[in-house]
Amino acid sequence: MTRSLDRLIRPRSIAVFGGKEARRVIEQCDLMGFTGDIWPVHPKLDEVAGRRCYRSVAELPGAPDAAFVGVNRMLTVEVVRQLAERGAGGAICYASGFREAVSELADGDELQQALVEAAGDMPIIGPNCYGFINGLDGALLWPDQHGVIRIDKGVAILTQSSNIALNLTMNRRGLPVAYLMTAGNQAQTGLSDLAYAALEDPRVTAVGLHVEGFDSLPALQRLAARARELKKAVVALKVGKSEKARQATVSHTASLAGSDAVSAALLDRLGIGQVSSLPELVETLKLLHIAGPLASNEISSMSCSGGEASLMADAAVGRAVDYRALKSEQLPTLRSTLGEMVTLSNPLDYHTFVWGNVKRQTDAFTAMFAGGYALNLLVLDFPREDRCNGADWLLTVEAVIAARAATGAVAGIVATLGENMPEEIAVQLRDKGVIPFCGIDETLAAAETAAAIGRAWARPAAPPLLDTAFADGESVVLTEAAAKAELAAVGLRVPESRLASNPEDAVKAAEELGFPVVLKGLGVAHKTEAGAVKLNLQTGDAVRAAAVGMQAVASGYLVEKMVEKPVAELIIGATRDPVAGLFMTIGAGGILVELLEDSAILVLPATKEDILAAISRLKISKLLNGYRGGPKADLAALVAAVASAADYVVSNAAKLEELDINPLMVLSDGKGAVAADALVRRRR
């Protein structure tokens, strides 16, 4: 059920429960100029912060739009129940000691469930969270100081961590924050729900997520679809790359973090941008606030120093940004403006010949911005205000603003060191439509992310994600023969084979198939390590000897026609992620699995276009395309094989635990792809 959060996050009346935290909520509302009603509730006090104090929910003048519940965890449940019965618009549950503290408090899980039941249809945020700041209307359910100011429009930032939220409010980078919201344990209302509600506000331009654990796939898909409809981008910082981070996530938020690689693939599928640090998140949000997603990854850079130009060029290595060469029509104006001594290139070192000359700078910047780049950057570190005179730097700012206005291009000024972008100048640039960037690496990360969102939105919307409940039951592993039979039924090619119960039957089977053959022992989990697989057997005697050698470990035999030498060996796998459910992996197979660690994630369901794109990202794709004059692989057959495996996974989603096809032998062009080995683990 989707609950409306409108009254809660845009309240006209607020009730506060508790002691010092409740008082701070009132103080922060007053500081931000909240004009609605505030009703303190306390069993003993007569007034709080100059306002009459009520004894209970029942005594309130009406049902509050929002409530800050800053009492102990036991009393929180009862207050929430009373608010729900009164018809309140929602509540912030500040107290900790719920599911996040299960290891310390035996009743934490049960208490959180009781809290959700007490709320019923009324939205609650938390528990174990600070609440939120609405910088548009001055409404705060936030028990602490912060750095947000009133604005007319800006971005929404959402996080499970109250301390991260507090830190973000203190940034001096010129980021306009419309909403800052914390979700805590996400007991009922998750980050995606909060983000959706913020996105609906016409004054919100973009949304940033600091994600420790996703609340639900349907809610995340709903958010991504709505963001695309409204043309308001969402960008996420998903923590959990390291094992230590995953452990901290579980202990801190009682959430399942999921695999980082799977999360990245999931976000890419949904068109949600991804960054890897808080500074990158802030810089990307500034870009999205002013310009939205970028039309391409082509960028330009100008600086009055060769050293800065080199830094900009080097920072792009390994990033999906393109310093596309200048167009011929740009060159005459740049040459006449900058002089003969300047090398016209991108990144461009324009030297200091036009320094302090607004007209010539404007002409040069206008020529650069007219090149059709998705983003135009000018490197400019500002001098210290307490020791230096920055008048000439302000002339450059004037020229950039004029060039952007003349061309309508997306433009930003980059301070190589974040502290060299004064906040007042950042705000001035932002208000004039110029992005005030702090840090070269963060700037290029923002460009890369905004371009990725633009590419995702240019594609047709992906179909809904696979969302099938996992069946209960005993876990069983199919025999290799049974697994291959099921895969063959969905179109995957497998070697011609025979089953045999003893060495003599194995010899007869080999003669029927024709030599050379492969002999495998049945009932052996790790065949290679156990000596239960023999390749390229050329005679009946060789088959007999191999079968006798396996008798101690094998319950029977699988005899297969030997597959010819492949161009490449790949692995196709499927397993379950705690958040994303079933997903597939494709990568370098055979002995290269651990050696290369070369794989790509496929979120299901997957199209043939998705599969081909995943294959193209693999290191082994060079081999598939005919490395150094070698034969080209049958790429069409490879794509078809992966698609067949994906069909099998989707069809068996309710009971499949694991699929492992390794190796998939990809033959030369026109000869196909063959699953040489397969494992299926599923619920009975």
Image (cartoon, rainbow, N blue to C red):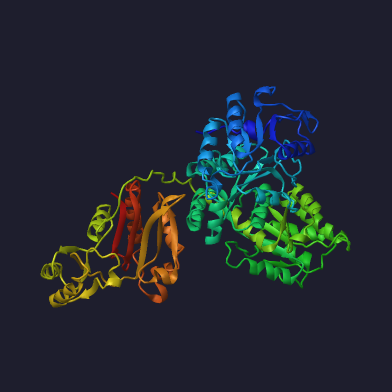
Q: Residue at x 61, y 24 (%)?
A: 86
Q: Can residue 372 be spotted in the picture?
A: no
Q: How far across and down, in percent of the image, does residue 368 sit? A: 71, 60
Q: Residue at x 39, y 44 (%)?
A: 468
Q: How far across and down, in percent of the image, does residue 42 sit? A: 71, 31
- How many dots with numbers? 0
Q: How far across and down, in percent of the image, does residue 646 sit? A: 35, 53
Q: Residue at x 67, y 48 (%)?
A: 165
Quadrant housing residue 135: top right
Quadrant housing residue 671: bottom left
Left/right of residue 67 with respect to residue 474 in the rendered view: right
Q: Is residue 588 above or below residue 472?
A: below
**Could you say which is closer to the camera, residue 373 or residue 673?**
673
Left/right of residue 639 with respect to residue 597 in the rendered view: left
Q: Can residue 227 be spotted in the picture?
A: yes
**Could you say which is closer to the camera, residue 73 or residue 389?**
73
**Could you say which is closer to the camera, residue 66 or residue 248?**
248
Q: Residue at x 77, y 58 (%)?
A: 421
Quadrant housing residue 419: bottom right
**Could you say which is closer to the camera, residue 565 or residue 548?**
548
Left/right of residue 6 with respect to residue 19 in the rendered view: left
Q: How far across and down, in percent of the image, does residue 228 sit? A: 55, 43
